[in-house]
Image (spheres, grey):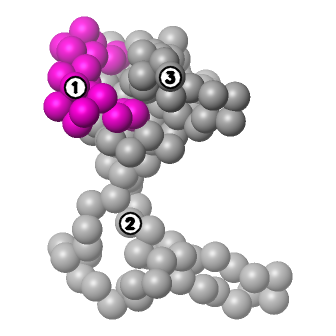
Amino acid sequence: MLLQATNPFCTAADLDRALERFEECGERGLVSIGEVDVSPILMRTMAADGALSHLLAQGSTVRRQDMPTYFTFNGAIFINRAEEIRPDTSLNDSPVGWALDRSQALDIDEPADLEEARKIIARR
């Protein structure tokens, strides 16, 4: 298990539940994830000439209420069997996701994240 020191709000209970999920899934690699703020259905790439292309094959004609939920890695918890780890292993490629609440998964990488952490502490 790899825990990032920059995720101070991840609790022992979060870790216990992630380990249980890891065991339930046949001990296949597990990575913590969190729900994204903006659906990739609404995202576009832009070519040098300014032409936009859908990020996903699915167009944006889907009502927001009907859009699937998308997740991204939050970097809080990684669980793998030792024999799975090789020099070219990316822990983000683990096949099992474990969704953490946003407040538990805050990753402090820059000053704005530290300010958010202070707000969470003040609310508690």
State the CA–CA distance, disc 2 to disc 1. 30 Å
Marks 2 and 3, the one that precedes in the sequence:
2
Residue at (44, 75) in percent of width and height: 42
Q: Position of residue 21 (x, y in %)?
A: 20, 30
State the CA–CA distance, disc 1 to disc 3. 16 Å
Residue 69 sits above or below residue 54 on the image: above
Q: Check residue 47 in the rendering and tell me which mark sits there, or answer none.
A: none
Labels 2 & 3 near each other (Cβ < 8 A)? no
Q: Position of residue 117 (x, y in %)?
A: 42, 20
**Residue for badge 3:** 83
The three-letter code of the residue at mark 2 reads: Ser
Element at label 1: helix
Element at label 3: helix
Q: Is residue 103 visible?
A: no
The three-letter code of the residue at mark 1 reads: Glu
**Residue for badge 1:** 23
Marks 2 and 1, the one that precedes in the sequence:
1
**Residue for badge 2:** 39
Residue at (27, 61) in percent of width and height: 69
Q: Residue 30: within the magenta?
A: yes
Span highlighted in magenta in the image: 9-31
Query: Which picture quadrant has residue 81?
Result: top left
User: Which image quarter is the N terminus in?
Assistant: top left
Observer-nearest of 110 and 70: 70
Q: Is residue 58 visible?
A: yes
Q: Is residue 50 left or right of residue 119?
A: right
- Dot 1 crowding, Cα within 10 Å, few <14, some 14–19, many 20+: few
The three-letter code of the residue at mark 3 reads: Glu
Q: Position of residue 39 (x, y in %)?
A: 38, 66
